[in-house]
Each structure stands twice: as structure tokens, then as C-alpha cells.
Image (cartoon, helix red, strand yellow):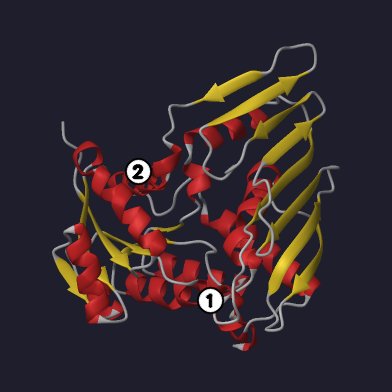
């Protein structure tokens, strides 16, 4: 039996919006995904995107997309600085929302966004595709089941060599620039997935002349005795790997740990075990799309894989890191 069609709207037309739309279109027959509308800040931009992907409606403004009652869920794919306003606009108009990460610029905005979703009884999920990946889900299940004993350390890094010039959005504080929200959100979210919110946060960073972080190291601590050593960079091509070590073994993820197709479990006295799940790592965004559609069809207002309380906790940790390294955004000054 064909699954009930879920009609998507796409808000923004950048690189991640293109990748997500590509994956959605590939899911039309198998999962009942349909992309029916796109919005950009300009009509020309929206029309060009619509023509590229065969999308029937193109809007030169967010409000028109939010008001489109033929849209079941809107994928918010703009810069971090636009997430709260764009997602709230859609939620208030009755649309369900999948919002890119980092969820917002700070935890205050994240709380406000969750409150809007709950007030309007709409579905809201942060687009943390890593959490929806079957390989990552299997890893987390093994850790929860005690396969490696009590977790003691988590390591994860994400760095790009750049260079990113002063005019780039990643150098603009008003747009939530810096390594932390774009890249560091992955290592931090990985640690949260396995250990929850940390009890202590330490950090150090190299800042740009504009005041955003270019290279950041984080040490998170939990009262139970675990630590996480995490890093992100806009100045160095780091390994982009991750590992979690417990009292009886460890699990290692290779390069591109945030969209893996396999991991290796090491336990004392046993041969290494490789786990795969038939994952196509080139199209991993489909797993978060499938989870959104599953939730909508089931009438759920949030995903158990990417719960809102978890997204709020990650934003609190990112706030704490920024506090330690001295990075502030203009939005932090708003009441």
C-alpha cells in the first residue's frame, strides 16, 4: 500500500536546501514525499530553485509559504540567524517544521521556538540528521545496552581547512558565524546523544577579528565520571572522526562520523566487530525526512529520535562554550 503523501515546502535555496530537496525527490515513490513549494527572499531565487527541481510553486517571501495550506511541513534551511523567525512564522500559520541545526542562535531563542510549537500544537524537530542515521541509532543502542560498559570518554572533531574570508557568512557574528554553530554542533550533539547534558563545560578558542571562533576545543564533564574531548575548526581539515570508550570496550566511527555507513566495536579478548546497516551515506538526509514523515503520519508532535528537550540541552551547552571563549552575537543582547 502506498504511504500517505506528505507535502513539503522548502524555505531557503542554498546548498543544504538543494541536498535535502534532492533526497526528498528520491523518496517520492518509496516514502510518499512530495515537494510542492519553495520560498526565498527573492522571487527570482525561488523560481530558479523551483525550475531546477520541478517544484510547482515559488514564493518570494516566507509568509506566502507559511500561509500555503497545501504544505504539510516546512523545511527551514536558512542561516542560523533566520531559524527562529522563519520557523516561528510557519508554526504560527499552522505548518509543521523541520528546522536546520544549529537549532537557533542561542538557548533563549530555542526555548521561544519550542513554546510557539507547543502553543500552536504543531510538530517541530531540529534537523540533526546524525541522530536519524541507522548506524548511529545502532551505536547508541549498543552503548545504552552496556556493550562497552560504563562510558568514560567521548572524542569527536569536525574541521574544515577554509580559508573563509572576512565577507563569508561564517565570519559574520550577526549570522551566527564561527566554527561552533556550523560544525561544533555535531561533536557536541554526539556527546549529548551518549551522555546527556554535561555538568561542566570548559573551552578555549582562537577568535577572528570579527569575534567569531575559528578553532575551538571543548572539555565536557559529567558527575558520573565521563569526559568528552571535542573540537571544531574553520582553519584545519581535521580527521572528522568520533569514538566512545567504556570500561569494557570502545566504538570507533571513521571520517564523516556524522553520516556514517559503518562503525567498529572493539572489546577485550574479542575480534573487532564491524556494524553496517545498508546506509547510503551520500543521501543520509533521507533518514531525517523519513522520521519527520513517520511522526506526522502518527500524529506525533515531536520525534523520539530528536526530542526537543535534547535540542534545548545542546543549545545550552553551545551557549556555555561561547560564554567560556568570549563569543557573543548581536541576538544575545535582545530581550
Residue under pointer 2: 290
* Figure label count: 2
Q: Position of residue 264 (x, y in %)?
A: 64, 26
Q: Earlier in the sequence, mark 1 or mark 2?
A: 1
* Nearer the camera: disc 1 or disc 2: 1
Label 2 CA crowd tier, 10 Å (few <14, some 14–19, many 20+) = some
Residue under pointer 1: 169
| Depicted 282 relative to depicted 311: above or below | above
Q: Position of residue 143 (x, y in %)?
A: 67, 31
Give the side of residue 266 with respect to residue 137, left or right: right
**Viewer-proximal residue, 12 or 309?**
12
Let me know if residue 109 appears in the view: yes
**SS of the residue under disc 2:** helix
Q: Residue at x 40, y 65 (%)?
A: 77
Q: Quadrant of the N terminus?
A: top left
Label 1 CA crowd tier, 10 Å (few <14, some 14–19, many 20+) = some
User: Can you tell which quarter of the image residue 278 is in?
Assistant: top left
**Viewer-proximal residue, 74 or 49?**
49
Amino acid at each position: 500500500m502506498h504511504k500517505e503523501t506528505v507535502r513539503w515546502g522548502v524555505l531557503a535555496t542554498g546548498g543544504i536546501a538543494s541536498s535535502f530537496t534532492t533526497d526528498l525527490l528520491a523518496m517520492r515513490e518509496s516514502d510518499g514525499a512530495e515537494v510542492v513549494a519553495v520560498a526565498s527572499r527573492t522571487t527570482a531565487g525561488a523560481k530558479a530553485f523551483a525550475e531546477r527541481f520541478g517544484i510547482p510553486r515559488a514564493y518570494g517571501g516566507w509568509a506566502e509559504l507559511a500561509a500555503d495550506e497545501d504544505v504539510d511541513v516546512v523545511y527551514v534551511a536558512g542561516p542560523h540567524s533566520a531559524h527562529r523567525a522563519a520557523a516561528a512564522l510557519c508554526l504560527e500559520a499552522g505548518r509543521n517544521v523541520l528546522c536546520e541545526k544549529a537549532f537557533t542562535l542561542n538557548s533563549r531563542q530555542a526555548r521561544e521556538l519550542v513554546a510557539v510549537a507547543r502553543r500552536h500544537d504543531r510538530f517541530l524537530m531540529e534537523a540533526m540528521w546524525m541522530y536519524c542515521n541507522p548506524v548511529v541509532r545502532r551505536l547508541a543502542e549498543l552503548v545504552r545496552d552496556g556493550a562497552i560498559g560504563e562510558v568514560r570518554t567521548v572524542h569527536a572533531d569536525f574541521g574544515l581547512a577554509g580559508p573563509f574570508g572576512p565577507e563569508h557568512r561564517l565570519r559574520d557574528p550577526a549570522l551566527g558565524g564561527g566554527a561552533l554553530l556550523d560544525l561544533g554542533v555535531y561533536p557536541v550533539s554526539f556527546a549529548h546523544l551518549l551522555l546527556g547534558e554535561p555538568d561542566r563545560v570548559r573551552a578555549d578558542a582562537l577568535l577572528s577579528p570579527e569575534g567569531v571562533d575559528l578553532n575551538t576545543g571543548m572539555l565536557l564533564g559529567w558527575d558520573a565520571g565521563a569526559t568528552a574531548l571535542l573540537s571544531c575548526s574553520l582553519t584545519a581539515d581535521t580527521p572528522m572522526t568520533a569514538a566512545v570508550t567504556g570500561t569494557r570496550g570502545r566504538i570507533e566511527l571513521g571520517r564523516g562520523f556524522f553520516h556514517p555507513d559503518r562503525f567498529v566495536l572493539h572489546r577485550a579478548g574479542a575480534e573487532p566487530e564491524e556494524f553496517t546497516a545498508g546506509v547510503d551515506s551520500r543521501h543520509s538526509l533521507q533518514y531525517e525526512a523519513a522520521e519527520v514523515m513517520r511522526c506526522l503520519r502518527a500524529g506525533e508532535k515531536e520525534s523520539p529520535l530528536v526530542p526537543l528537550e535534547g535540542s534545548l540541552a545542546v543549545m545550552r551547552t553551545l551557549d556555555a562554550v561561547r560564554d567560556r571563549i568570549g563569543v557573543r552575537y548581536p541576538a544575545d543582547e535582545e530581550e
